[in-house]
Image: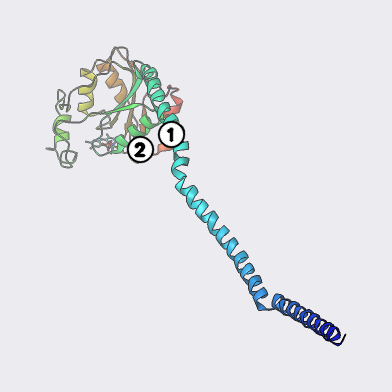
Amino acid sequence: MKNWKKMFAGLVSAVLVVTMAACGGETASQVTDSSSPSSAVSEESSQSEAAVPAVEASQPEEASSVSSSSAPEHSRAEAPSEEAAVESSPAESASQPEEEPEQQPGGTLVVYFSATGNTQAVAETIADTLGADLYEIVPEEPYTDADLNWNDPDSRVNTEHEDPSARPAIAGGIPDLSSYDTIPIGYPLWWREAPPIVWNFVETADLAGKTMIPFCTSMSDGIGSSGDTLAGMAPNATWLAGQRFGENLDAASVTQWVQSLGLDAAA
Ligand SMILES: Cc1cc2nc3c(=O)[nH]c(=O)nc-3n(C[C@H](O)[C@H](O)[C@H](O)COP(=O)(O)O)c2cc1C
């Protein structure tokens, strides 16, 4: 019996020891759970969470860089429209030949002579307004300032003015006028008339059937009978009343006059 009691007491002690040992382990594990390693895990977690948006934020950048690297694909996607634009160009160029006949007979050519630029400015304004072609009567021998000095009795202009047969040569000759039927013709007034080189043009060119519209620039005189003089040199043309402008371009008045003529811009 004593041995059994000792054995029982020993068994109980052993159980107690085991039980206490077990309780101590559980306490240790709880402290561990609430200890810094847990917060460390939490921090790691929060760090990783913070890092994720950063990564995610960087991912969109990567994605954008990817999309920018996919830009070529975008470009490729746009390529068809570019190709379409290219295709439309040939289509446009294909339609151009259809427009060309409109520039054939029936067109307007603005012809002018200008020694110092005043008439040229008017002529260019007329051509711009009408969308018309422009032709400058260029002397084979250009007029110098000395040539234009009317106060010098021996100057070129005075010499030509005193010779009724003087017809200064035109550089390049007379252009082909066959595709034009309306010709505004401009000049500076020299002694209230068109300069003799303009007479040369009107006498030499085939103006039969053309509608001629004189215009001039001058210091002070009106166009006077200078247009009638030209009409007498090319009676096979129809000559409309002329218009005088001042030495300094007044584009508005030029445009207003052109529009009053009622000419078709394409004509
Ligand atoms: C030789 C010569 C004769 C001129 N005769 C006249 C004239 O009779 N009446 C007039 O108002 N202006 C006269 N002028 C001035 C010009 O007609 C005027 O300056 C004109 O705008 C010049 O045009 P351009 O720059 O196109 O040559 C004459 C100019 C020159 C050089």
Asked whether mark 1 and ligand 1 are closer than 8 Å, the reply comes as no
223 on left or right of 85: left
Quadrant for the N terminus, please: bottom right
The answer to whether residue 98 shows anywhere in this view is yes
Query: Residue 167's x, y, as percent?
Result: 16, 25
Asked whether mark 2 and ligand 1 are closer than 8 Å, the reply comes as yes
The residue identified by callout 2 is 246
Residue sitting at 48 percent across and 52 percent down?
65
Q: Amino acid at mark 2?
A: Gly
Quadrant for the C terminus, please: top left
Location of residue 3 with respect to 58 vertically, above or below: below
43 on left or right of 201: right
Under circle 2, the secondary element is loop
Under circle 1, the secondary element is helix
Foreground of the two, 260 or 228:
260
Residue sitting at 40 percent across and 33 percent down?
254
Query: Residue 172's x, y, as percent?
Result: 17, 26
Binning the other alpha carbons within 10 Å of mark 1 as few (below 14), some (14 to 19) or many (20 upward) gives few
Numbered badge on residue 131: none
- Do residues under tags 2 and 1 come within 8 Å of each other at their CB atoms? no
Location of residue 89 with respect to 178 vertically, above or below: below
Foreground of the two, 261 or 75:
75
In the displayed orientation, state which residue is furthest to the front.
Answer: 1
The residue identified by callout 1 is 82
Tell me where residue 57 sits by quadrant: bottom right
Query: Residue 195's x, y, as percent?
Result: 23, 29
The picture quadrant for ligand 1 comes to: top left
Foreground of the two, 171 or 238:
171
37 on left or right of 225: right
The answer to whether residue 267 shows anywhere in this view is no
